[in-house]
Image: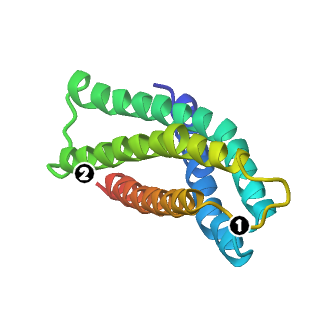
Amino acid sequence: MPLVLRALILWLHLLAVIVWIGGLLFQVLVVFPTLSRAGQAAAWIRLGLSLEVRFRLVMWPAVGLVLFTGLVNLLYVWHATVMLGSSLPSTFAPILTVKLLLVLAMLALQAIHQFVIQPRRLALFGTLAVGGRELPAALLTLQRLALALSITLVSLAAGVVLCAVLLRGV
């Protein structure tokens, strides 16, 4: 693969990772703390949910780009080792396996968060009375669950980044 194309693929991979992980960090470090300080007021919950819906529109294309460019990078490594007869260090395969398992876990948790938890939060929020101050206990529970999933996703992302750094050093 030409060096320019290889650099472009790597740059796109890193850009998509930054969008995905950066959005998760924004949720964990800005959106959820703002909601907790606001006393769970309905207007703040609406704002938080709308930010998450907007992030979803950017996040899934970024995830797709991460997967595509990651596959291209993996095929490049395979081509360099199998077709050209290069060798890899013995630690490469185990670190890559851990990285791929962490990415799969992130995808599963992100899908649960976006396609199961978030629609339920939106539905419960839609049942609130206009101007109502009290939030249903079920909505508060789902809010805490969404925060826990987001924190878990950020933690898994840190593991993926660590594996990527280790792979670059191998």
The disc placed on residue 95 is 2
**Quadrant where the image shows the N terminus:** top left
**Disc 2 and disc 1 in contact, CB within 8 angstroms:** no
Mark 2 crowd level (few <14, some 14–19, many ≥20, 10 Å Cα):
some
Q: Position of residue 33 (x, y in %)?
A: 65, 73
Q: Position of residue 147 (x, y in %)?
A: 53, 62
In the image, 117 versus 5, the foreground residue is 117
The quarter holding residue 4 reads top right
In the image, 115: left or right of 92?
right
User: CA separation, marks 2 and 1?
Assistant: 48 Å
- Looking at the rendered structure, the secondary structure element under dot 2 is helix
Mark 1 crowd level (few <14, some 14–19, many ≥20, 10 Å Cα):
few
| Number of the front mark, 2 or 1 | 1
Q: Earlier in the sequence, mark 2 or mark 1?
A: 2
Q: Could you tell me the amino acid type at mark 2?
A: Ile
In the image, 108 versus 127, the foreground residue is 127
The quarter holding residue 143 reads bottom right
The disc placed on residue 33 is none
In the image, 159 versus 47, the foreground residue is 47
Q: Position of residue 63 (x, y in %)?
A: 53, 37
Q: Could you tell me the amino acid type at mark 1?
A: Glu
In the image, 34: left or right of 136?
right
In the image, 51: left or right of 83?
right
Relative height, residue 6 to residue 26 (above, below): above
Relative height, residue 153 to residue 11 (above, below): below
Instruction: Tell me the residue that label 1 is attached to.
Output: 134
x 73%, y 52%: residue: 128
Q: Position of residue 46 (x, y in %)?
A: 76, 54
